[in-house]
Amino acid sequence: MKHHLALVGVSGAGKSTIARSFAEHAGMLLTDIDAEIVARTKKSIAEFFAVPDGEEHFRAYESQILQETLARTEPTVIALGAGVVLDSRNGQALLQRAVIVHLTVPFETACARITTQRKQGADIRPLAVDADETVLRQRYHERKMAADSIADVTIDTTEKSVERICEELDGVFPA
């Protein structure tokens, strides 16, 4: 039975914000994979990516925490990092245990949101630092295609309030 709700999508789609809001609204547990990694390891995501093999270690933590979360019996809203779906094993695990909602935004919107978050002091997207537009577009399309391939439902978050998106999620995953 699928009793978890997994939010997937590119960086800047609103996964963490929407997951927090919907979990509270629905009275469900929340696991934000990126936040959980930082809490457990006491390292920022940027610190992982700054060292050789750091991304590999980070991806291992992602997979481990995802597996632990999916093993829960309590319904949980899961906010996944944009890269977690690049590992097909993670995708297969999600397909078996969660309703998967792909939150989408156009490339330009994602970039604008990431820029705003960085200006507000967020240090959460190390792969976007110093990357040129071609590389960013490639990563965007790679992650978007991976999320598309496993999604049960797609919701465009462009110009929608968090409340409106939560209403749409109610129709997909009634609490």
Image (tube, rainbow, N blue to C red):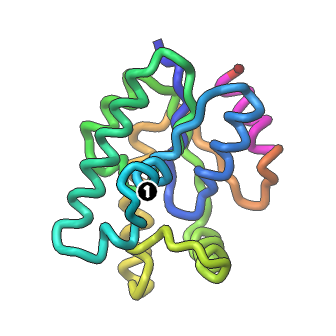
In this picture, residue 130 sits left or right of residue 116: left
The magenta stretch is 164-173
Quick one: quadrant of the C terminus? top right
In the image, 129 versus 54, the foreground residue is 54
Q: Position of residue 147 (x, y in %)?
A: 43, 47
Image height of 153 relative to 1, above or below: below
Evaluate whether residue 153 shows in this view. Answer: yes
Q: Position of residue 55 (x, y in %)?
A: 26, 64
Q: Secondary structure at mark 1?
A: helix
Main secondary-structure element of the magenta-colored stretch: helix
Q: Is residue 108 visible?
A: no
What residue is disc 1 on? 38
Q: Residue at x 36, y 79 (%)?
A: 135
Q: Position of residue 116 (x, y in %)?
A: 66, 77
Neighbour tally class for label 1: few under 14, some 14-19, many 20 plus, Cα within 10 Å: some
Inspect the magenta stretch and tell me whether residue 169 lies in it: yes
Q: Is residue 22 above or below residue 75?
A: below
The residue drawn where x is 30% and y is 39% is 64
